[in-house]
Amino acid sequence: MKKASIFPKVATDLFWVQLFWAFGFLGIMFVIHLIKIVMAINSNNDIEIYFVSTFVAANIFMLVVGIISSYGFLPHYVSNGVTRKDYFKGAALASVGLSIALPVITSIVAVIELFILKMFNMSSIFTTTFGERVNMEDDGLIVEVIQSIIIAPYVDPQSNWLLAIFIVILNLLTFYLLGWLIGSAFYGFGVVIGLVFIGISIVLVFIENALLSIGLGLTVPERLSSYDFGLPISIIGVVAIIIIVLWVIRQLTKKVAIKM
């Protein structure tokens, strides 16, 4: 009899473990956010809603969790009899679930905080906008790449909540998978190959950033200003990047020696 696949259980277990980490991260960000609210009220300045305030930090969090996925979870599951294929499928599903959960949670918190402060006539301190990108026309490729990593494409939730959440999901999933890719390269093939994949990941972030920025009509570097296509094409391009990264991760983890 064919053995039943265990990847759904792997996906569920990984999702809840990583969601627990995410609650810790979101909790820290919320404390920082509350401090910013108090300071904004006292100084009569604006402050971003919680959804926006976690925007950049969440990408870094997902990158780190992706790296941990290769170093911590792969040896654990394989040493306990789970096939690499089941681990891969489960981890991939968990990454999607986590990428969806974070912006949904922060959106709910943002709606609640706006409702509460509106009751006290203080909702005017909030803004849903994110800092505009600087003009990079003369700053060179390196600055463009750095900004692509730090400031991902963003949609004002006040204009379209669903699109804003969807774009964040794509960003988070991309960073998670790139972290997983980098970690897998270091774990299985050493420092040199790992550094190569860091470079590859930076390039992929830049491409994903450019695709979404063009599709959303955001500010792009001068060298990319001649490109003009709609959001559906951008999304197809980002999904293609995600599929390629998943395929490479699968190849890297398929026969890698497990370090106990």
Image: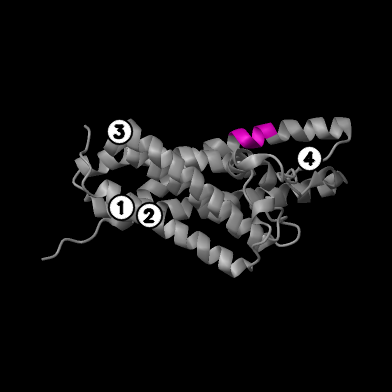
Q: Is residue 67 left or right of residue 105?
A: left
Residue 195 versus residue 256: which sits nearer the camera?
Answer: 195
CB under 8 Å between callouts 1 and 3?
Answer: no
Q: Which mark is residue 47?
A: 4
Give whichever of discs 3 and 4 has the lower sequence position: 4
Give whichever of discs 1 and 3 has the lower sequence position: 3
Residue at the location (53% across, 55% down)? 100
Amino acid on which the number 1 mark rests in the picture: Arg
Identify the secondary structure beneath mark 3: helix
Q: Is residue 130 visible?
A: yes
Spatial CA span between label 1 and label 4: 42 Å
On the image, numbered disc 3 is attached to which residue? Answer: 190
**Which of the two marks, 3 or 4, is nearer to us in this view?**
3
On the image, numbered disc 1 is attached to which residue? Answer: 250
Q: Which mark is residue 246?
A: 2
Work out which residue is located at the far left of the displayed protein and give it: 1
The local crowd at label 4, few if under 14, some if 14 to 19, many if 20 or more residues have their Cα within 10 Å, is many
Identify the secondary structure beneath mark 4: strand
